[in-house]
Image (cartoon, rainbow, N blue to C red):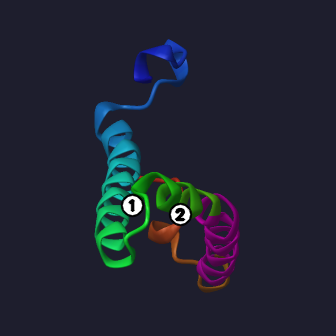
């Protein structure tokens, strides 16, 4: 995916790795949570994955959005330059 970005806008390797590693860790967590829950509930792991995905894509995104807005407001109010979202230095 990194090579699909325009060359003049391409992120450095370090920043690209930081962005993609968060996604990979989240996917691993969901996978192991589904395996664990399917053993506990005797449910099909695929149906649990669908439920987890739908909850993550709706409620999870809403909570993340609200959290980022609250933290961004606090960072702006306190003028903490090093804690601005998306700015890695």
Identify the residue at horizontal 43%, vertical 31% (top origin): 11
Identify the residue at horizontal 68%, vertical 68% (top origin): 65
Q: SS for tag 1?
A: helix
Residues at badges 2 and 1 in contact (C-beta under 8 Å)?
yes
- Hey, which residue is sitting farthest front in the picture? 42
Magenta segment includes 45: no
Question: Mark number for residue 2?
Answer: none
* Cα separation between marks 2 and 1: 8 Å
Where residue 74 appears, as percent x and y from the top left, is 63, 84
Q: Is residue 58 left or right of residue 80?
A: right
Range of the magenta residues? 55-75
Where residue 36 appears, as percent x and y from the top left, is 29, 70
Say few, some or many: other residues with alpha carbon within 10 Å of mark 2 (under 14 / 14 to 19 / 20 or more): some
Identify the residue at horizontal 64%, vertical 59% (top origin): 54
Q: SS for tag 2?
A: helix
Q: Mark 1 or mark 2, which is nearer the start of the sequence? A: 1
Q: Which residue is mark 1?
A: 30
Identify the residue at horizontal 62%, vertical 77% (top origin): 67
Where residue 87 appears, as percent x and y from the top left, is 49, 53
- Quadrant location, the N terminus: top left
User: Between residues 73 and 50, which one lies in front from this camera angle?
Assistant: 50
Magenta segment includes 66: yes
Where residue 45 appears, as percent x and y from the top left, is 40, 57
Above or below, 57 relative to 4: below
Q: Which residue is mark 2?
A: 52
Among the 4 quarters of the image, the one containing residue 68: bottom right
Q: Magenta segment, principal secondary structure?
A: helix
User: Between residues 58 and 68, which one lies in front from this camera angle?
Assistant: 58
């Amino acid at each position: 995916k990194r090579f699909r970005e325009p060359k003049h806008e391409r992120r450095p390797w370090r920043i690209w790795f930081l962005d993609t590693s968060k996604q990979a860790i989240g996917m691993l967590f969901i996978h192991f949570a589904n395996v664990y829950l399917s053993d506990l509930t005797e449910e099909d792991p695929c149906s649990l994955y669908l439920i987890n995905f739908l909850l993550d894509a709706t409620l999870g995104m809403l909570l993340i959005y609200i959290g980022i807005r609250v933290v961004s407001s606090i960072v702006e109010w306190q003028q903490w330059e090093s804690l601005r979202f998306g700015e890695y230095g």
